[in-house]
Amino acid sequence: MTAVSHSAQADRGRSGEAGLRLVRRLDGELAAQWARVRGRLREEVGEVEYRTWLKQMTLADVDQDEVVIALPTRFLRDWVRSHYGDRLRSLWCAENPEIRRVALRIAAGASAGLAGEVSPGGTTAAEADTAALNGERVTLREDAQRGDGARAELAGQLDPRFTFATFVVGKPNEFAYACARRVADSDRPQPGFNPLFLYGGVGLGKTHLMHAIAWSIRERAPGRVVAYMSAEKFMYRFIAAIRSQNTVEFKEQLRSVDVLMVDDLQFLIGKENTQEEFFHTFNALVDAGKQIVVSADKSPSDLSELDARLRTRLGCGMVADIHATTYELRIGILQAKAALAGMIVPQKVMEFLAHKITTNVRELEGALNRVVAHAQLVGRPITLESTQEVLHDVLRAQDRRVTIEEIQKRVAEHYNIRLTDMSSARRARAVARPRQVAMYLAKQLTSRSLPEIGRKFGNRDHTTVMHACARVAELMQRDAAFAEDVELLRRMLES
């Protein structure tokens, strides 16, 4: 044997011995190294972020210069890889110079052990990773396989009355109706129709169209998972997930649906964390080719308090507005509702209601319901005179529409403060209490939403308006003189 071959053999022996020493050393120090890596990562990202995204990481294997870390779901694996992958590798390299790579794999349903250990689903971590990369489903879509119970929870409380068949189409809403039908009749998002953004004033039919889309999809394609919720419910579910340290399940549940529908998006204004979560959910669903339908009281460009990134995303699809009703549309709505109730309502009564109640379809339907119910209960025919008698309070309120500006002016004069104090940042009690009274009266005497009232008072958050209304109501119960003062202002404004 030559000197060179002896030297090569010795080198190979030394290399093999070094490799064995590495494996033995890692077997002894693995847990300590992994604990230090996790500890440093925890310090860097913070406790909340660590619990949300990184707590479920498990060390699965160390193969020569590669560390294998297991995560329970594909979504979590992808998120950690894109947001923390480089940092994990840096921390491991600093902890152990022999480590060069960090691999993230899926071990569904359990804390992963070594690389060859089989998960409860019968899949090794390596096999699960390969399957995920090939587009196969490794984890169950729980919300789609739990059955009707989970689907009903996602779909929320859909009103059976709100279908396309019962939606009265007219010039103010025909474009929004056509867009809604296009989304409902399509199996995949159409170019330019994702998201579909419906906006308009209170009681003009946004929620009706949202429910109609959901009903139509459920009837035409029962296998598609539709999630419908208000923005307020989205926020409460997100907060509950944070409190229960279950945000991963919340995120996965929403990201696994085929259609996400969120009503009254304006209620996310001022909720930065919830807006951030909705933004990421929005992006994940659009990237996955899923349909999103959103409604609000204003167009995306007018929701200036929303995050700029979210406004941009919302405006990139189809934006359809629902205008105020016309006389002809109101007549059509009244005729449809009367036919649905099986009642014969004189044409003069319908024309009278269509002329008198012009701003809100809900008020129009409510007025007709009262007239019909009165006729059924007392056993008298519906006449113009009986309609005026039954609806005297509604008609008086319609005849005398109070504006927020009028309320602010009258309250400022009553309490002898400047009109500009209503929207100023001053918190002195002499200014804050009249401002709260004005907010309370605006809520009682107008049909404006809480966010709209807040914007009229110096762009204040709707929670400020809620607090003001609650505070004034509480003071009215405790202080008879204060209650008399507020009632006097109400009578002056309504007179």
Image: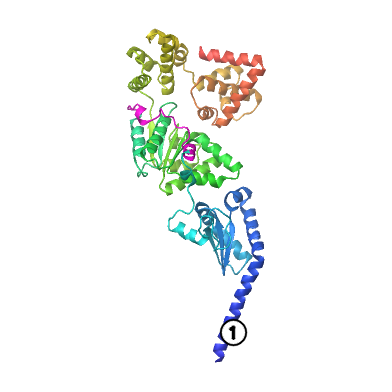
Q: Position of residue 332 (x, y in %)?
A: 33, 22
Q: Position of residue 273 (x, y in %)?
A: 56, 42
Which quadrant holds residue 188? top left
> In the figure, 241 relative to 385: above or below?
below
Q: How is the image coloured?
A: rainbow
The residue depicted at 42 percent of the width and 49 percent of the height is 288
> In the figure, 217 relative to 447: above or below?
below
Marks counted in the figure total 1
- Identify the residue position indicated by label 1 in the image: 10
- Res 431 visible: no
The residue depicted at 33 percent of the width and 34 percent of the height is 178
Q: 154 or 495: nearer the eye?
A: 154
Q: 462 or 410: nearer the eye?
A: 462
Residue 161 magenta: yes
> In the figure, 358 relative to 158: above or below?
above
The residue depicted at 51 percent of the width and 57 percent of the height is 122
Q: Quadrant of the N terminus?
A: bottom right
Q: Secondary structure at mark 1?
A: helix
- Which amino acid, by three-letter code, is at mark 1? Ala
Which quadrant holds residue 392? top left
The residue depicted at 56 percent of the width and 25 percent of the height is 420
Classify mark 1: residues with Cα within 10 Å, few (<14), some (14-19) or many (20+): few
Boundaries of the magenta span: 149-172
Q: Position of residue 136 (x, y in %)?
A: 43, 55
- Res 17 visible: yes
Q: 38 or 479: nearer the eye?
A: 38
Residue 394 magenta: no
Q: Position of residue 78 (x, y in %)?
A: 50, 54
